[in-house]
Amino acid sequence: MGKIILRLDRVMADRKMSLNELSARVGVANVNLSKLKNGRINAIRFSTLIAICEALDCQPGDILEYSKDEE
């Protein structure tokens, strides 16, 4: 089974945006964004993904990447 890789840290670095700034813009707690940034989540609400994309001026595909397992 493949997996989803989160690239939030890369997009934030490209935009020179800190976790604190993104948290303030999105309205999501720092702790939850940190888990998202470090890939320690199992799900994300579309409303949160939309808010992140609006704050970072990006597409969901910039943040989420699918990796197929090699068998």
Image: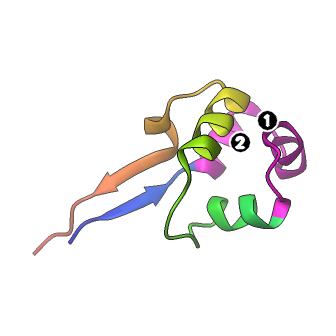
Is the residue marked by circle 1 packed among few (<14), some (14-19), or many (20+) residues within 10 Å?
Answer: few
- Considering only vertical position in the picture, is 26 above or below 29? above
Quadrant of res 25: top right
- The secondary structure that dominates the magenta segment is helix
Q: Position of residue 8 (x, y in %)?
A: 61, 49
| Left or right: 30 as drawn, with respect to 3 | right
Outermost top residue: 57
Q: Give the range drawn in magenta.
A: 8-30
Q: Name the residue under label 2.
A: 13
Residue furthest to the left: 71
Q: Which residue is drawn at 71% across and 42% down?
A: 13
SS of the residue under disc 1:
loop
Number of marks drawn: 2
Verify whether residue 37 appears in magenta: no
Residue shown at the point (70%, 41%) measured from the top left:
12
Q: What residue type is labelled 1?
A: Lys
- Name the image quarter holding the N terminus: bottom left
Instruction: Give x and y (percent) for residue 21.
Output: 88, 42
Q: Mark 1 points at which residue?
A: 16
Measuring 83% from the left and 45% from the top, which residue is drawn there? 27
Residue kind at label 2, given as amino acid type: Ala
Identify the image quadrant of the C terminus. bottom left
How far apart are the alpha carbons under marks 1 and 2? Answer: 5 Å
How crowded pointer 2 is (Cα within 10 Å; few <14, some 14-19, many 20+) is rated as few
